[in-house]
Image: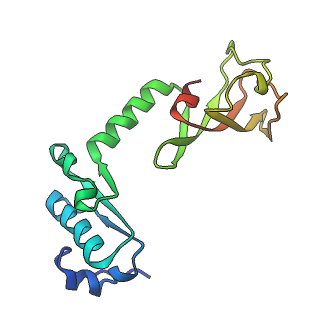
Amino acid sequence: TEVIYEGNSVDPSVLETAGVREAHVVAAVTANDSTNLAMCFVSKTLFDVPRTIARVNNPVNAWLFNEKFKVDVALNSADVLAHLIQEEMSLGDMMTIFKIRRGNYAVIEEKVPPGAKAIGVPLKDMDLAEHCVIAAIIRDGVMTLPRGDSTLQADDEIIAVASPEGAQK
């Protein structure tokens, strides 16, 4: 069930009516940076909300979105878009399925191109352990769970959990 409350999002009585005391997370995503900062500050200091997320509309204001204003996660639209563009440019045909651990790791899918250095090399000999775990190999439409002695072939699709360094490797 969704409930919409109308009012000033930084007014403590409005936040209380909306149930902020029971909230695990408050996401301040208005089009106004000062409102988003104030909402995080009020939510944490008056209502002890465990986690706050704030939208940064103007990149010039990004430096304000920190622990001083009780912002746990700042989502700077310009930054997010720039990182997505950079990732797409650097990863070629690799597709990020989703990110985990605040973007430090990602579940990725990659097709092994013909002539790749990894073809025929056992996974245990690829020196990936620290940066990347191959979770599945899909060959001719059949998924297998890889072992240390598994090898890749051209056109295999791999699904992996990787850090940014592991994704490049």
Quarter placement of the C terminus: top right
Q: How did the renderer colour the structure?
A: rainbow
Q: Position of residue 79 (x, y in %)?
A: 30, 40
State the image quarter where residue 160 is shown: top right
What residue is at 14 percent from the left and 60 percent from the top?
Answer: 34
| x and y percentages locating residue 152 in the rendered image | 76, 24
Q: Could you tell me which quadrant the N terminus lies in?
A: bottom left
**What is the x, y in percent for residue 151?**
80, 25
Q: Residue drawn at (40%, 81%), measured in percent from left and top? A: 22
Q: Residue at x 53, y 29 (%)?
A: 165
Q: Which percent across, then down, holds residue 46? A: 25, 78
Q: How many labels sit on residues? A: 0
Horizontal side of 43 relative to 59 (left or right) equals right
Left or right: 8 with respect to 19?
Answer: left
Asked if residue 71 is positioned above or below residue 144 in the image, the reply reads: below
Query: Residue drawn 20% across and 43% down?
Result: 59
Vertical comparison of 72 with 100: above or below: below
Q: Compared to 169, does 13 lie above or below? A: below
